[in-house]
Structures are given as structure tokens and as C-alpha cells.
Image (cartoon, helix red, strand yellow):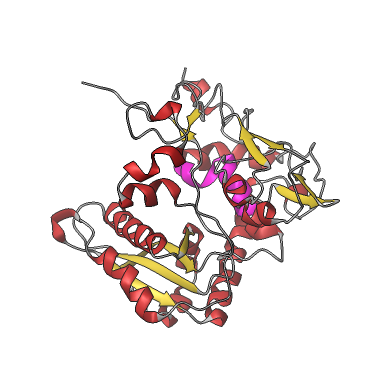
């Protein structure tokens, strides 16, 4: 049993969600490819298709490609399932993905049929999507302050309000941070991915395998840092690291860094996450778009640059929120795994 927990600690055999396209509806607009956080979709001969860069189509089932498609040409089928080893999750889910089911009998109705029966807050929650397609239009500081104000009134342990924000609306500074984050991601791919996968190639070498030193090192690294070593996360890190055209923050006009005081009460990360979600929901209710970008934590390796941004040692970088006006319709309902509930 003990050995089983260590088996398949890196790149375990898994069933991945599958990209399905209706070629009659697809116009090759490219929005799906631009919205995919792991660059698993590409446009060839004016049609979308899976980008076979890796040995698997490492889809994370965010379904943003479906949400942004103006023609409804895309469907993601299936779920991510690992049957054995450290990452085993097949026993944690029941039934598969479903559309929102907030009301009795809503499973048998389309969202559009009962949307008006929901509160405005519920509608924003169900329709909010991570936005990676932004207009170049700037966001006024008055509007930025308005969404941060929603974050200010989030609950926190002991009412300690540990958060602080660094707001960047200078594109040159955002580009500088992008370069630094990409350097750290590049090192991450050196540790966690086969050499052949570290360069953007289509199709990629699907027979590539980890080196001996990686196979010896990664089981330990996985146990210490599971959140950063899941194979789906590695695909996202590699997207940032391998493609010179990829921008960590999607050329959003505004970047809000969410910091937490290390001396705060209780879980400062949880409190900061609640604060961030208040900001995100307020932004989408106002017609803005957002995307959480946790790769910003890579700045911990650049103390001089942190100092330039006014981030003292007492502050921990928790996450960042890319903010701007969406390019076209992005917010939309998608399917999600059913809730794991134990009734007592």
C-alpha cells in the first residue's frame, strides 16, 4: 500500500477530456485557441483541432473554448481520471459533469429558461469565466478602485483584513513581470518535463519520456509540492515557458497583485482568496473580465524587483488578477463536476 502511493507520481496514465468539433459550425475564428490556457487547440485550414504537442491531450476541462466559441461548434467530453497511484482520483467523483442545478428540477431545463429566477449574484457566479481575450481599452482607476472596494469588505479571520494590493496599469511594467515569470516557468519545465516538450512544436514528440534523474527526483518533489506538479499544471507552465508569443497576463491592461500580511490571523491565503473572489465577481457584474494568474508568485525569486514594486518582506504574494474589458462574449455557463457532499 505504501509503495502504491508513490507509483505514477509523475505523468501518471490518465483519461483526459476530449475535444469535439462540429466542422460545419466552425469558422476558424481562433478564439478557442487564444482562450485555451494550455494551448491545446490550434487553427489549421480554417478549422480548430487539438494541438498534439504532448503524449496526451492534457485538457483541464475548463471549457473556456466552448464558452468563447460564437458558433457553438465545440464540446469537451469526458473528465480527467487517474485510476491508480499517488494522483488517483477516479474514486472521488460520482456521475460526471453537469450544468448548473441551483433550483429543484433545473437539471431538466436549460439555464436560459430559469436564469431570471436566480438572483443577480447567482447569475454572475454561474456565468463568470476566466477571460484571456482582452480589449486594448484601458480601465479607469475609478472603476479599478470600485472592484477593489468589493474585496475590502470580504470576511477574514479575526477581522484582520490581511490583504494589500499592488495595481499595475503600465503595460511596460506588466511586460517586465511577464519576462520574470517566464524565466521561472522555464526552470520548472527543466525539472518536470521531457526535454522534447520544452519547445513549442506541432506535433510534439509524443514518445518523449522523463530522464533518469527526473524519475528519481520527481516522486519526492511531487509529495512536497503537489499543487505545482500535477501533470495538468505542468502543461500550463510549459505554455508560458515554451511559446515566445504567449503572455503570462494575456496583455490585460491592468494587473492587480493580491498580497497578504504574513503576521495575519489564521489562514492569510484563504482570506486573500475570499477577497480576490469578491473583486472578480464585482468586476464581472460591471462588464469587466478577469483571470487569476498565480504564476505571479514567481516574483518571490526576485527580491530586488519586489522592492521596486514596494513589496516588503512582511508581504506574501498570494495571486494576481488580470483585469480588463473582454474581447467579445466570454462569460457563459459551462458544465462542472458534481459536488462531493456527505450529508450528516
Q: Is residue 261 magenta?
A: no
Q: Nearer the viewer, residue 10 or 283?
A: 283
At x 57%, y 67%, the residue is 134
Frontmost residue, 64 versus 217: 64
Query: Which residue is depicted at the point 78% across and 41% down?
Result: 24
Image coordinates for residue 100, horizontal then vertical, percent: 42, 36
- Does 1 appear above or below 204? above
In front of the other: 174 or 306: 174
Magenta stretch, main secondary structure, is helix
- Residue 314 seen in render: no
Q: Is residue 165 left or right of residue 87?
A: left
Residue at 55%, 66% in the rendered image: 249
- Quadrant into which the C terminus falls: top left
Return the x and y of residue 290 as percentages of the image width and height.
46, 61
How many dots with numbers?
A: 0
Spot occupied by residue 333 in the image (x, y as percentages of width and height): 48, 44
Answer with the quarter of the image where residue 246 lies.
Answer: bottom right
- Residue 339: x and y in percent read 38, 30
- Looking at the rendering, the stretch of residues picked out in magenta corresponds to 224-238
Q: Residue furthest left?
A: 158
In the drawing, does residue 91 fall left or right of residue 186?
A: left
Asked whether residue 234 is drawn in magenta, I would say yes
Q: Residue at x 60, y 45 (%)?
A: 66
Amino acid at each position: 500500500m505504501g509503495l502504491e502511493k508513490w507509483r505514477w507520481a509523475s505523468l501518471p496514465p490518465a483519461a483526459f477530456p476530449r475535444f469535439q468539433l462540429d466542422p460545419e459550425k466552425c469558422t476558424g475564428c481562433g478564439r478557442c485557441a487564444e482562450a485555451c490556457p494550455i494551448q491545446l487547440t490550434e487553427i489549421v485550414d480554417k478549422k480548430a483541432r487539438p494541438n498534439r504537442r504532448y503524449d496526451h491531450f492534457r485538457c483541464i476541462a475548463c471549457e473556456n473554448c466552448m464558452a468563447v466559441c460564437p458558433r457553438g461548434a465545440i464540446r469537451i467530453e469526458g473528465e480527467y481520471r487517474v485510476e491508480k497511484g499517488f494522483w488517483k482520483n477516479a474514486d472521488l467523483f460520482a456521475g460526471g459533469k453537469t450544468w448548473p442545478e441551483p433550483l429543484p428540477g433545473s437539471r431538466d431545463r436549460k439555464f436560459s429558461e430559469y436564469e431570471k429566477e436566480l438572483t443577480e449574484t447567482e447569475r454572475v457566479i454561474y456565468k463568470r469565466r476566466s477571460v484571456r481575450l482582452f480589449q486594448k481599452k484601458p480601465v479607469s482607476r475609478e472603476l479599478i478602485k470600485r472592484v477593489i472596494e468589493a474585496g475590502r469588505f470580504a470576511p477574514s479571520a479575526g477581522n484582520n483584513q490581511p490583504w494589500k494590493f499592488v495595481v499595475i496599469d503600465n503595460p511596460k511594467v506588466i511586460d517586465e513581470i511577464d519576462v520574470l515569470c517566464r524565466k521561472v516557468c522555464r526552470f520548472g519545465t527543466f525539472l518536470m518535463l521531457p526535454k522534447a516538450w520544452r519547445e513549442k512544436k506541432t506535433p510534439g514528440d509524443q514518445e518523449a519520456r522523463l530522464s533518469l534523474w527526473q524519475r528519481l527526483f520527481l516522486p519526492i518533489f511531487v509529495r512536497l509540492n503537489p499543487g505545482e506538479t500535477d501533470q495538468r499544471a505542468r502543461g500550463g507552465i510549459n505554455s508560458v515557458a515554451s511559446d515566445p508569443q504567449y503572455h503570462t497576463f494575456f496583455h490585460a491592461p491592468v494587473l492587480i497583485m493580491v498580497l497578504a500580511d504574513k503576521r495575519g490571523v489564521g489562514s492569510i491565503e484563504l482570506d486573500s482568496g475570499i477577497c480576490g473572489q469578491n473583486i472578480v465577481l464585482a468586476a464581472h457584474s460591471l462588464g469587466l473580465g478577469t483571470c487569476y494568474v498565480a504564476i505571479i508568485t514567481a516574483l518571490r525569486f526576485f527580491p530586488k524587483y519586489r522592492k521596486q514594486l514596494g513589496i516588503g518582506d512582511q508581504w506574501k504574494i498570494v495571486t494576481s488578477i488580470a483585469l480588463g474589458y473582454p474581447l467579445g462574449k466570454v462569460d457563459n455557463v459551462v458544465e462542472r463536476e458534481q459536488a462531493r457532499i456527505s450529508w450528516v
